[in-house]
Amino acid sequence: MTENKEISALFHLIDDPDVDVYNTVSDKIISFGKGIIPNLEHLWENTTNEEIQERIESLIHKLHFRDLTEDFMHWKNGSCELLQGALLTAQYHYPDLQSMQALQEIEKLRRNVWLELNSYLTPLEQVSVLTSILYNYYKLSGTEIAYDHPENFLINKTLETKKGNAISNGIVYLILCELLDIPVRAINIPRQFILAYFDPQYEFMNPIGHSSEKISFYIDPLNGQIYSHKDVENYFKRISVPPTTSYFKKMNNKRIIQYLLEELSKCFDNDRNRYKMEELLQLVKLLDDDI
């Protein structure tokens, strides 16, 4: 953006000690939109005062967040594709993210799985093909959820490093299933991010049946391990929670991204970064159906 007299005057007031003056200046700068970010970056590079640099960084962050909020609104009201939602979430932490590499990795994986699939495979064989390519050939590995590693929640880093937690690995798994028409969905089992294979024939014949009866088996996205109904029953006994129907219902893409944002927000539960936690929870609320 060409720097005119108004922008120059605003930049001179960035260091104003009066909070009200700074807030007015901040709001005015943000009103220019992200086109002003290169000007702010140039100002940052030519400033040695750390306090001013922090204010500039805050302004750039607010500009990125405003755009991201708009993008999430469009996503919510549009296709709600899981891949796009995961990439938008990654942009919160990596605002300059170029999505092409992630898209190419997903397409490469989709093609490798598709070449091995055929209509004669059983559900378990279908999933075994996908699992083998993802965890054995592609070498995707799982790591326990740790809130001091936000990158492990984000799809771009999961694809780049071939390492993610159950949520990010699970989202990659679900995206591939979506692209390949494999009826695997995330379900709402407490304290876990678990996937389930829903038998389409059973669903068609018994649309109002208990959700768990529509499930053939379960998949742990951390490593691709298959679980039976008995395994899941034992898990509920172990955590002393009754296995109600709601835990076995499919999570839609919007809810999966809300869950991802909620979990990512926990990475910033400290005094220095609490504003990030609050912003991520704002995005969660934004995706609610009543907004």
Image (cartoon, helix red, strand yellow):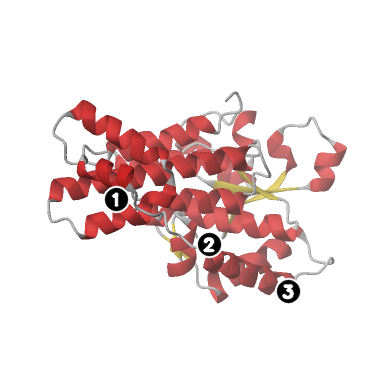
Q: Earlier in the sequence, mark 2 or mark 1?
A: 2
Name which residue type carries label 1.
Asp
Q: Is 85 or 197 nearer to us in this picture?
A: 85
Label at residue 116 = 3
The local crowd at label 2, few if under 14, some if 14 to 19, many if 20 or more residues have their Cα within 10 Å, is some
Which label's residue is closer to the chain start, 3 or 2? 2
Left or right placement of residue 125 versus residue 243 in this view = right
User: Which percent across, then down, holds residue 194?
Assistant: 55, 47
Viewer-closest of 126 and 44: 44
Mark 1 vs mark 3: give the one in front.
1
Q: Position of residue 40 (x, y in %)?
A: 30, 52
Amino acid type at circle 3 is Glu
Alpha carbon distance from label 2 to label 1: 24 Å
Residue 72 lies in quadrant = top right
Q: Disc 2 vs disc 1: which is toward the camera?
A: 2
Callout 2 secondary element = loop
